[in-house]
């Protein structure tokens, strides 16, 4: 390899960590960083994300830096001595197995509380709404005035989810067909919707506003358009909206079908 080619390759490898880190540094300024968090548990998830990002970031920069340094230093064209090839080192292999294993064990323990808050400490309440994923939309069912899901006065809607702010909400998640993933980026919720299962999802939104519902599982040709809206609003506004939607549904269906239960796998 010529002298110039050696320099080129060394600098190319040096550009990777520099540009890689720069991308992360400027991203927030361009608004292409994490979406705004409007939930109670989001902060603990974000801090886990940053912790892992910094940890992997440091390892990345050090590895790339070493790669650059060895390419630069041991360039044969510069007349330095040739690299020595070493076949296996028991000590080294033990060390680089134990360090990642210990790191992973630490993360597994460190994240337990955040995981339990989001996936295990389910609030004792009946579902606020049932979300039924299907190709390619979000079907929603609110318990009617009787407060019970699965009765004839249920309120049925599509893609237009409303939830109250500043109180725990419980979503009952189902799928009518294939695997989908119920993703609410602004409250840091992502949960697979699995055919044949009723999966509880809970969180507390802290800010009113309109945000995205995204399907985060490639679920078929129309996956890209499987997008809904979620509106968080204070309890009074939420109740008023529910009343309005009930009234609309009653006006369009004077004779409710006896068992218009669109949900599968009950
Ligand atoms: Cu989907």
Image (tube, grey):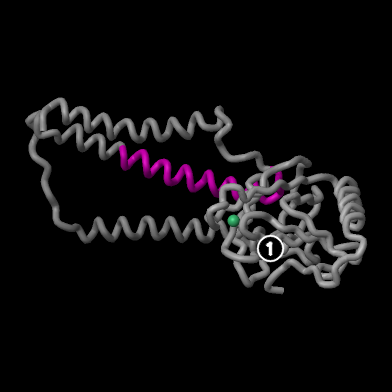
Q: Which residues are magenta?
A: 38-64
> Can residue 188 be seen by looking at this rendering?
no
Q: Using the image as rendered, state which of residue 110 and residue 266 is in the foreground.
A: 266
Q: Position of residue 266 (x, y in %)?
A: 72, 74
Determine which quarter of the picture holds residue 75: top left
Residue at the spot 20% in from the left edge and 36% down from the top edge:
71
Q: Quadrant of the N terminus?
A: top left
Residue at the spot 39% in from the left edge and 60% down from the top edge:
101
Q: Is mark 1 within 8 Å of ligand 1?
A: no
Task: Please give left or right for residue 132 compared with residue 153 in the image.
Answer: left
Task: Please give left or right for residue 89 compared with residue 201 in the image.
Answer: left
The residue indicated by pointer 1 is 173
Determine which quarter of the picture holds residue 67: top left
Magenta: main secondary structure equals: helix
Q: Position of residue 38 (x, y in %)?
A: 70, 43
Residue most extreme to the bottom: 266
Q: Residues within 10 Å of mark 1 (few under 14, many from 20)?
A: many
Label 1: element kind: strand
Task: Please give left or right for residue 10 compared with residue 219 in the image.
Answer: left
Q: Position of residue 100 (x, y in %)?
A: 38, 56
User: Where 10 falls versus 39 (above or below)?
Assistant: above
Residue at the spot 74% in from the left edge and 54% down from the top edge:
158
Q: Position of residue 96 (x, y in %)?
A: 31, 56
Residue at the spot 32% in from the left edge and 31% down from the top edge:
15
Q: In the rendered structure, does residue 50 fall within the stretch colored magenta?
A: yes
Q: In the rendered structure, does residue 99 fall within the stretch colored magenta?
A: no
């Amino acid at each position: 390899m010529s002298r110039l080619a050696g320099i080129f390759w060394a600098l190319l490898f040096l550009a990777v960590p520099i540009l890689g880190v720069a991308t992360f540094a400027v991203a927030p300024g361009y608004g292409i960083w994490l979406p705004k968090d409007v939930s109670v548990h989001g902060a603990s998830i974000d801090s886990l994300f940053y912790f892992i990002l910094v940890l992997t970031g440091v390892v990345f920069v050090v590895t790339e830096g070493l790669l650059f340094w060895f390419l630069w230093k041991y360039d044969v064209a510069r007349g330095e001595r040739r690299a020595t090839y070493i076949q296996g080192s028991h000590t080294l292999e033990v060390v680089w197995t134990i360090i990642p294993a210990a790191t992973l064990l630490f993360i597994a323990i460190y994240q337990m509380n955040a995981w339990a808050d989001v996936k295990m400490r389910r609030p004792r309440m009946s579902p606020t709404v049932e979300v039924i994923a299907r190709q390619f939309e979000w079907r929603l069912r609110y318990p009617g005035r009787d407060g019970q899901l699965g009765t004839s006065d249920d309120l049925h809607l599509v893609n237009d989810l409303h939830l109250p702010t500043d109180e725990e909400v419980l979503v009952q998640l189902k799928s009518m067909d294939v695997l989908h993933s119920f993703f609410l980026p602004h409250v840091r919720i992502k949960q697979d919707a699995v055919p044949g299962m009723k999966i509880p999802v809970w969180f507390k939104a802290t800010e009113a506003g309109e945000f995205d519902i995204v399907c985060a599982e490639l679920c078929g040709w129309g996956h890209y358009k499987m997008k809904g809206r979620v509106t968080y609003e204070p309890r009074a506004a939420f109740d008023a909206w529910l009343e309005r939607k009930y009234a609309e549904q009653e006006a369009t269906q004077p004779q409710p079908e006896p068992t218009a239960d669109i949900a599968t796998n009950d």
